[in-house]
Image (cartoon, grey):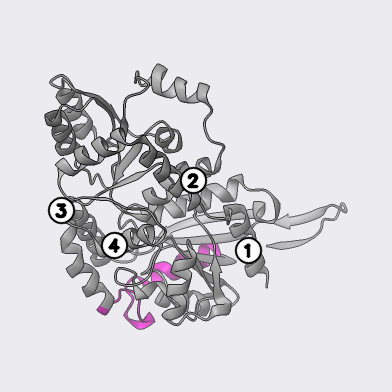
Amino acid sequence: MVSGISPDGYPLVIAMRVLILSSSTGGGHDMRARSFEQWSEATKGPASTLSTHRYQALEAGAGIYRFGVQIYNLIQKKCPVLHHLYFNWLEVFQVSAHERLLLGKQRFVAVLKKTKPDIIISVHAHTNHAFRAIAKTTLPRVKFVTYCGEMFGGYGFSRHWVDPQADAFIGATEAVCAAAARLGMPNEKIKYGGFMLNPKFFAAQLNTTQKTQLAHTELNLQSGIFTVLLSTGANGAQNHPRFIQALEKSQLNVQVIALCGRDKAARQALDTMQDSLQHVTLRALGYRDDMFPLMQISDAIVARPGTGTTSEAIMAGCPLLLNTLGGIMPQEWITVKYLRSQGVPAQRLKKPADLTQQIQQLSTHPEQLTALKQTMIALQPRMHPDELLNYIVDLACR
């Protein structure tokens, strides 16, 4: 960012250029990259001069990296437990460990020369070390920052998140900041940053009228009936039919909002299933950008224990029931460990019938449901994205 006085005597400010490095392994990395873009447009103050550009560093770098991303997402969708093999292999054979081994270097250099960023923000564990080295060689004055959306350390927290030569490590929680310090990140470079989510998750809670409009008028749901939101991952990882069949078999009177994203076939299958249901009220929805309101009208959300949906559920104060059908990934384990360390039971659903048991328990003991909501609210970060972006601007200006 260059500032000064124009020939007419007015303040002159040229936007600070930000390059965001991401990759579509799962959905959380891209979600945070998009959120940085959205906040750079929505925020006021020093950070309002940010001009962002996003680069899918792995997929754009080489075909083998693109294939690796596809394998990652396929395992997540079909058999999550196999990720223990994939994760541990990547811990040894790091994609971006050394500059000389990185594929697609010239493509990255071309992006750097075209965008000329003042600061680079990496939101992925494998877009650090070599990418930072190449960036510093190409643009010696550029600042390089890692934003890590993980929540806890230990097994499942990739050591590749931590690059001691980076200018800063920003962690979503204080627990993951402590984990970065244990892995060698200098304390003076560590910054607690809170959650980087869509600005809508930092809006005011819905009032009674707004909840009624969404629940009753738009979705035709009834008051006083337990409502569960079935989430889906960015890559279509979901078990909606199995959960719905278990609920129907139990004869529970329950309302289900099933998110299908852009998977038209999944939504069509649920629409067909709805005709045969006698006890479950089903509302199958396509892609929505109003997750914050949907969570607020739900008594609980069923989702894989990824950091993205977990962070969103915390901001909405929505109890989280963890879908771990097919096993649990190492990256998901650290989310479970974080929740439990903060007093959240973090109940795992290992089979569809477990959801029936959880809903029966929470319906019979509403005080437990209230306590869960309060516990989720208590985890909301004290750091606001505006403050985080201002920190980034200040760092780039040093």
Residue 87 position in % (x across, y down): 24, 69
Instruction: Find out whether residue 98 is within the magenta segment.
Output: yes
Q: Amino acid at mark 3?
A: Gly
* Residue to which mark 2 is pinned: 198
Circle nearer the viewer, 3 or 1: 3
| Residue type, mark 4 in image | Trp
Q: Secondary structure at mark 2?
A: loop
Q: Residues under labels 1 and 4: Cα distance? A: 30 Å
- Spatial CA span between label 4 and label 3: 14 Å
What kind of element bears circle 1? helix
How dense is the environment of label 1, judged by Cα within 10 Å: few (below 14), some, or many (20 and up)? some
Looking at marks 2 and 3 on the same chain, the residue that comes earlier in the sequence is marked by 2
**Which is closer to the viewer, label 1 or label 4?**
4
Mark in the foreground, 2 or 4: 4
State which mark lies toward you, 2 or 3: 3
Q: Residue at x 42, y 51 (%)?
A: 311
Q: Which residue is mark 3?
A: 326
Give residue 205's position: percent from left, percent from top.
53, 35
- Residue 125, position in %: x, y? 37, 68
Q: Report whether 14 appears left or right of 364.
A: right
Looking at marks 1 and 4 on the same chain, the residue that comes earlier in the sequence is marked by: 4
Q: How would you rate the neighbour count of disc 4 (Cα within 10 Å): few for under 14, some for 14-19, many for 20 or more? A: some
* Most foreground residue, 376 or 293: 376
**Prevailing secondary structure of the magenta residues:** helix
Does 254 lie within the magenta span? no
The answer for how far apart the CA atoms under marks 3 and 1 are is 40 Å
User: Looking at the image, is mark 2 or mark 1 earlier in the sequence?
Assistant: 2
Residue 367 found in image quarter: top left
* Disc 4: which residue: 333
